[in-house]
Amino acid sequence: MTHAIEIADLHKYFGQNEVLKGIRMTVDPGQVVCVIGPSGSGKSTLLRCVNLLEVPTKGKVFVDGVELTDPDVDIDAVRRRIGMVFQQFNLFPHMTALQNVMIAQQRVLKRGKKEAEVVARENLDKVGVGAKCDAYPAQLSGGQQQRVAIARALAMNPDLMLFDEPTSALDPELVGDVLTVMRKLAEEGMTMLVVTHEMGFARQVADRVVFMDGGVIVEDGEPAQVIGDPQQERTRTFLHRVLHPEE
């Protein structure tokens, strides 16, 4: 079986600073893999290397068996199969929710206006903001904006979804709505690579949890093992700080 994502000996330098130090990992079709770890551990850089928003210094990245790091690859064709949801919602402020979900379909997939609108409405309904089609981003809560951003990614019919701390910019009471949408996607079999600090979500939804620190993978396994019974001291220390911040 071809891996949905395969990362082989991935290194990334920013100047003299080596942020990723020989990462090797795979994600299989239909798997949800959550990447956890302290700030500055390289999690977001890893995610951005998967669709070449950051170009690896060394190593290879494959998506569905296609090598993205091959200089001759049609990167736009591969990117069309990858949905990406960021911390910041990146919606166009002068466009309604509906228009935000239509525009990439029309420009990138060359869908006609009618088809793009049907797909946009379907996906806005799917993420629970169908009633907000005509609202502008400034009229939406952070959680609603993030769900519009997820609908925009889904409207492109991706094979896999990358989430870069999708709830970290949200007020605590809005986090649950976004996680519910992501849970539903997981249940439907969407392949997902999720950088998150939501340990409850990782524990309940992930097939695997990867703990990163200092640009390396320290631990990789099932949630019950990595979160419930971590083998490495660095993992234990991190989880203790996250799960018991009052101590």
Image (tube, rainbow, N blue to C red):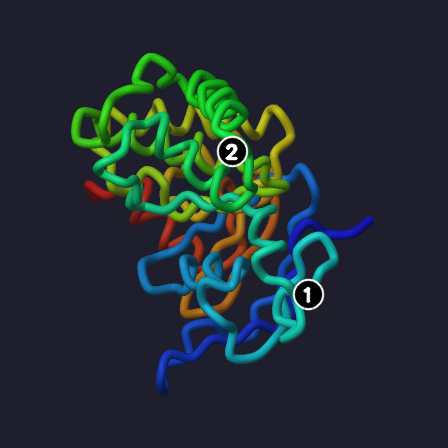
Dot 2, how many residues are within 10 Å of its Cα: few (below 14), some (14-19), or many (20+)?
many
Residue closest to the eye, 70 or 43: 70
- Residue position for label 1: 67
Q: Which residue is pictured at 34% across the width and 57% down the height? A: 38
The answer to whether mark 2 and mark 1 are in CB contact below 8 A is: no
Residue 229: x and y in percent read 52, 44
Of pointers 2 and 1, the one earlier in the residue sequence: 1
Q: Is residue 163 left or right of residue 91?
A: right
Residue closest to the eye, 164 or 155: 155
Among the 4 quarters of the image, the one containing residue 244: top left
Dot 1, how many residues are within 10 Å of its Cα: few (below 14), some (14-19), or many (20+)?
some
Q: Is residue 233 left or right of residue 40?
A: right
Q: Which residue is pictured at 36% across the width and 41% down the height? A: 166
Residue closest to the eye, 146 or 234: 146
Residue closest to the eye, 242 or 180: 180
Numbered tag placed on residue 154 in the rendering: 2
Residue 34: x and y in percent read 50, 45
Q: CA distance from mark 2 to mark 1?
A: 23 Å
Query: Which residue appears farthest toward the top when viewing the image?
Result: 131
Name the residue type under label 2. Answer: Leu
Q: Is residue 101 left or right of residue 156?
A: left
Name the residue type under label 1. Answer: Glu
Q: Is residue 70 left or right of residue 227?
A: right
Up the image or down, 173 lies above or below 242; here it is above
Quarter of the image that includes the C terminus: top left
Up the image or down, 40 lies above or below 127; here it is below
Query: Which residue appears farthest toward the right when viewing the image?
Result: 1
